[in-house]
Each structure stands twice: as structure tokens, then as C-alpha cells.
Amino acid sequence: MTTEVLLPEGDAQPEGRIGFGAFLNAEWIKIRTVRSTFWTLVALAVVSIGLTVLFCALSANSIANGSERDTHPDELISVGVVFGQVAALVLGVLVMSSEYATGMIRATLTAMPRRTTVLVAKALVLAAMLFVIGTIVAFLGYFAGNAFLDAKDIGVPLSQDGVVRALIGNGLYLAVLGLFGFALALLMRHTAGAITVGLGMIFVIGSLVGLLPGTWGDWVAKLMPGNAGSQVTVAHQYHSDQLGPWTGFGVFCAEIAVLLILGWMRFTRKDA
């Protein structure tokens, strides 16, 4: 007579022989073989590089002539990320929500029942991919766009203070922004809903809170995820009422960490 032993769900599963590297490899294979990942990253690259080049090409002559006194050349070297960040947010949402939409999450947790480990592997692969792609895209946009600025003798050299930090900051910002979408998908488990909330927080609410009266309204605006996190993507801050590059990025990371913890709690305690 045999006795069936029922194992609890989630992290209570016994440790198997599968190492963390296997989890990372599984998630890497999964994310890079999905067509939505490819097209989302293509959109990110095309939009970010294309708009950076376009803005530099259209503005170079007027900046050189002094007709655009409020625009500085170093503000243009990665301006495309303002629009490319949409793709990073969407990819972060899809990495998690698509598994719920297709029911694949059940197969994932059957094969790899250690939920926390699965979640960490997904987040690391997503963040690493967006950081690498985002940094490469930022440098490509810089070199292509700066050529138009150089032609008018207003180019921005890499040696200028803050330029390299801003270009690498683009990769960092997109990586954490992807985790923002990932956390929203964990909490909502709905693709359209998570994308809508994420875009609303970054583009709509982040701008509207600045209209609130008093100094507290200014502080709320500074602390909004998109406003705080994007400070690391600019080479020089021409407005003194913003958080510093690393301070703003630190606030952004802390906000997303809170959302990830809430998402982790829901993921490990609720049925798939």
C-alpha cells in the first residue's frame, strides 16, 4: 500500500536539483522566442533612434542661429527615449500578463513550482535585456543625431560632463520602467489594464499633478515615477526645481520596489 504525499503550493515546495541558472535560462529562452518581444524591442529602437535623429536634424540649424534660445543641444541627444519608453513599459507588462492570458503560467509553475525563484528570474532577465538594448539604442541615437549638431558646430562631445551618464541612464531608466510594467501586470493580471495604468501614471498623472496648488503639489510632481526616474536620462538639468539625476532615479527604484513586493505577495499567495 502506497501513501500519496500532497505537497503545498508555492515556495513551500522542497528544493529540487534545479539551480537558479536553469530558471534564468528558461526565462531567457521564453522571452526571446516570443514574437511580441522582438517587435516591441524593434519599436523601441526605431522610435528612440529615429526621433532623436529627427529632432537633432530639425533643430540643429535654429539652435546654431540662436532662434531657439530655450533649447540646448545636450537636451536632444536622447530625446527619443521619451517616446521609446512606451515600448519598455509594454514589454514589462507582456512578460507577465501574457502568461496569464494564455494559461501558460500554470505550465510554468508546474515545471518550476518555486514561485519566488520564477519571479526573480523573470525580473532579472527582463531588466538585463532592457538595460542592454536601452543603452545600445541611446548610444546609437547619440552618434546619429549628434552628427547633425556637429555639422553646425554645436555638437555634444562624449567627454562633456553628464553625457555618458545620461546615455547609460537611458538603459537604467528603461530597465526599471520595464519592471514597473512587470509589477503592474503582477498586481492586475490584465494586459490592457496594466498598460493603461502605467501609461497614465507616466504621461498623464505625472503632468497633471504639477497643477496642484502650493509647494506640496511641486513635490508630488517631482516624486511621480516618470518625472523622478527620467532625471537620470538628461545630461544637464536646466530647471533647478527637479530632483538630482541619481536622487530621482533612487526614488523611482524605491517606488517600483514597493510595487514589486506587493506583486510578489499576490503572486505567491493567490492561485495562478
Image: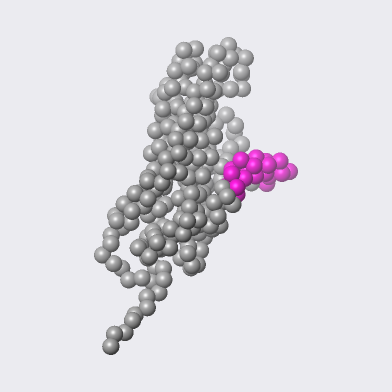
Asked if residue 171 shows in the view, the reply is no
Q: Say which of 209 and 82 sits in front.
A: 82
- The residue shown at (49%, 42%) is 88
Residue 194 lies within the magenta run = no
Looking at the image, residue 129 sits to the left or right of residue 226; the answer is: left
Give the vertical position of 183 relative to 268 (above or below).
above
x and y percentages locating residue 164 in the rendered image: 41, 30
Looking at the image, residue 147 sits to the left or right of residue 228; the answer is: left
| Image coloring type | one colour
- The residue shown at (61%, 18%) is 68
- The residue shown at (31%, 52%) is 25
Give the vertical position of 125 relative to 118 (above or below).
above
Q: In which quarter of the image is residue 187?
A: bottom right
Q: Is the magenta stretch mostly helix, strand or loop?
A: helix
Q: In which quarter of the image is residue 20?
A: bottom left
Q: How many labels were placed on the picture?
A: 0
Q: Which residues, given as a range, are shown in magenta? A: 196-218
x and y percentages locating residue 70 in the rendered image: 61, 22
Residue 198 lies within the magenta run = yes
- The residue shown at (37%, 75%) is 7
Give the vertical position of 272 relative to 185 (above or below).
below
Q: Say which of 157 and 13 sits in front.
A: 13
Q: Say which of 185 and 152 sits in front.
A: 185
Give the vertical position of 260 relative to 6 (above or below).
above
Asked if residue 29 shows in the view, the reply is yes
Placement of the N terminus among the 4 image quadrants: bottom left
As drawn, the residue found furthest toward the right would be 213
x and y percentages locating residue 213 in the rendered image: 73, 43
Q: Say which of 22 and 257 sits in front.
A: 22
x and y percentages locating residue 260 in the rendered image: 49, 56
As drawn, the residue found furthest toward the bottom would be 1
